Image: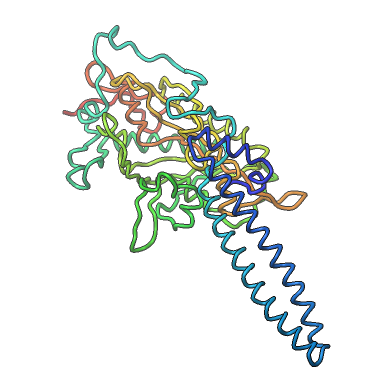
Amino acid sequence: MIDIRLLRDNPDTVRASQQARGEDPALVDAALDADARRRSSLAEFESLRAEQKALGKEVARAVGDEKAALLARTKKLAGQVKEHQAAAHEAEAELDELLYRIPNVIEGAPPGSEEDFLTLKSVGTPRDFAAEGFAPRDHLDLGEELGAIDTARGAKVSGSRFYFLTGVGARLELALLNAATDLALAAGFTPMITPTLVTPETMRGTGFLGAHADEIYRLERDDLYLVGTSEVALAGYHGDEILDLSGGPKRYAGWSACYRREAGSHGKDVRGIIRVHQFHKVEMFSYCSVDDAAAEHERMLGWEEAMLAKVELPYRVIDTAAGDLGTSAARKFDCEAWLPSQERFLELTSTSNCTTFQARRMNVRERTEGGTRTVATLNGTLGTTRWIVAILENHQQADGSVRVPEGLRPYLGGLEVLEPVR
């Protein structure tokens, strides 16, 4: 959640963030009102409690009518103390609920909706398939001929938007995720195989039970949630702990299955494996000092770009607009690869600086010379199933085969070309 001190001292900053996101700025005023009522009731409660204690000493010394009057006053005070205590608790509960509804305060993100992103850079040049003499095919056609993707049997077994990766498809995903893990290791990340079921407290604490709660699978009988990213489990890993970050950030690379309802998806994205209900991903996650968060964000983007270089994809980096940010993110950079079959860019990675938003909810702090303070958390994608879409389409050849990027060949036993099998 946002820092209550920021809300009190700089409410206009929070209002401006709400407006940039397209969210309701009135939540800020409602939270300020609840905070003021809570503080006022607490002050009254403490004042009356002090008077109550003082009267208790006088009652012990008093006799006769004086004692009776003091006892009557004490009884009245007891009722007032309870009233103000209850009012303080009620206002605190209202404040907590409002603070959980206010997204993180943006830091540098451009205002506007999904279309209002800024392109920070473009890397590589999309192939001119017309000049090469053939029209690019989409990843599903290619994947079926390679014996790599089977959506028909995926739907038969599990329903729409499920799939099997078979043969070289399975090997390609493992190659991609192992390459991502190796890159993470070289960058100082600790590899983690994370739980894919988490408690409501963990899911809520990481900011995923807000506007997009409908996209999350819930096991009602067990009161557990299936994660859409290992970020959730990793954000809860150090919950209620005080970290030593004197040696730098604590970095984890989580490998997990991920589950998303994708309830609002439609159009071409539902064909093949672009938007599916289950996939695998290697996710970077960092706990760092607030002062280092912006620099860590740039480092994460650099590692994502290094991974994209391994698979030789043309891509662009965008600064995501405020209205397209998740609840927890103060700023987010996306890397989008060119998709030849649709002549558009497709998001492959995103990296978010969540500042202290998640850590404040999860009560993760660091020890400093001046005491303890809330840490910052950041996350970023290093590889996921969707990358197969861009790899197949960008490296396809006229005969239906697919060239294996050099960076993945060591993970495929030196295989240089994926050949059609049917």
Q: In the rendered image of this protein, does residue 351 appear above or below residue 339?
A: below
Q: Residue 43's spot in the image, x, y percent?
A: 71, 62
Q: How is the image coloured?
A: rainbow
Rendered residue at 40%/52% (across/down)? 196
Q: Residue 345's spot in the image, x, y percent?
A: 38, 23
Towards the viewer: 71 or 260: 71
Rendered residue at 78%/79% (across/down)? 55
- Residue extending farthest to the right is 61
Q: Residue 21's spot in the image, x, y percent?
A: 50, 35
- Residue extending farthest to the front is 65
Please tell me in which quadrant of the rendered image residue 88 appears: bottom right
- Residue extending farthest to the top is 131
Image check: 257 left or right of 35? left
Q: In the rendered image of this protein, does residue 47 appear above or below residue 422?
A: below
Rendered residue at 81%/92% (across/down)? 63
Q: Residue 114's spot in the image, x, y percent?
A: 43, 29
Please tell me in which quadrant of the rendered image residue 242 appears: bottom right
Rendered residue at 16%/28% (across/down)? 422
Image check: 327 left or right of 157? right
Image check: 196 left or right of 150? right
Q: How many marks?
A: 0
